[in-house]
Amino acid sequence: MSVLRVEKVAKLFGSKLVFKNVSCSVETGEALIVAGPNGAGKSTLLKLMAGLARPSAGTVESTLAEEKTAYLGHATFLYPNLTARQNLAFWAKMYGITSPDIEGVLERVRLTRFAEERAGSFSRGMAQRLNLGRIFLVSPELVFLDEPGTGLDVASLALLHREIQALRDGGAAVVWVSHQVEHDKQLVDKVLELKSGKVAFYGPAAEYVLEPCSC
């Protein structure tokens, strides 16, 4: 079942065209990578898909309620003066979750030992794992990830990949902006590549071949 459908979407900033005629869909339990060079509009497209921005043309439709979607962007949305446990408790309250499994989430992102440490002292990898835990609190059915692997160490990256697979195994759909497509495409079903303001490729991940950079 399709949980997200994008039809002939375009985005302009003033008179500057970012992209146009972008169409794709994501099914239950399916993962899509959004690829392309810097400045192609990958993060912009992800925000349109997540409902955080409006397209200049075209439509974005999701069959899911807003509380069943989760977005992980470049900012971690963590409070540095709160501990890991306090951060999760705060977000659970914001989401309206009355009985959050905070201990289970801390274990899932391998932060149980650091539960009482302030998030401001965390490395990039630890902060991103805690941010991932924020998403797990809501048991989302549609997840948007904007370059979640940036700055992660090997162990944190491996955990991220395992959890992306776990989300899919649990029936969630995942839309993922990645700069490591050749490595990450083994974890997804489809790839959408933006280039020069349009869709350069959209299809099965197994058929996607990254062209050498001509710059």
Image (tube, grey):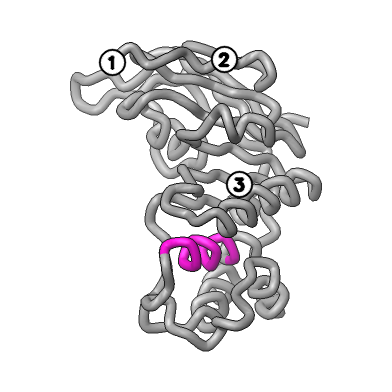
- Closer to the chain start, of discs 3 and 1, is 3
Residue on which disc 2 sits: 209
Residue 121 occupies quadrant: bottom left
Residue at left 43%, top 24%? 36
Instruction: Give the image location of residue 113, x and y in percent.
Output: 60, 83
Q: Could you tell me if the residues under marks 3 and 1 are in contact, i.e. CB atoms within 8 Å?
A: no
State the CA–CA distance, disc 3 to disc 1.
Answer: 33 Å
- Circle 1 sits on which residue? 215
Three-letter code, disc 2 = Val
Image label count: 3
Tag 2–tag 3 contact (CB < 8 Å): no
Q: Judge whether residue 132 is colored magenta.
A: yes
| Residue indicated by mark 3 | 143
User: How crowded is the residue under tag 1: few (<14 C-alpha within 10 Å), some, or many (20+)?
Assistant: few
* Placement of 111 over or under 204, stated as above or below: below
Residue at 39%, 51% in the rendered image: 74
Range of the magenta residues?
124-133
Residue type at mark 1 is Cys
Residue 168 seen anywhere in this rendered image of the structure: yes
> Which of the marked residues, 1 or 2, is nearer the chain's N terminus?
2
The percent position of residue 49, horizontal first and vertical second, equals 51, 35
The image shows residue 59, relative to residue 51, as above or below, that is above
Look at 61% across and 50% down and name the residue there.
69
Residue 215: x %, y % from top left = 28, 15
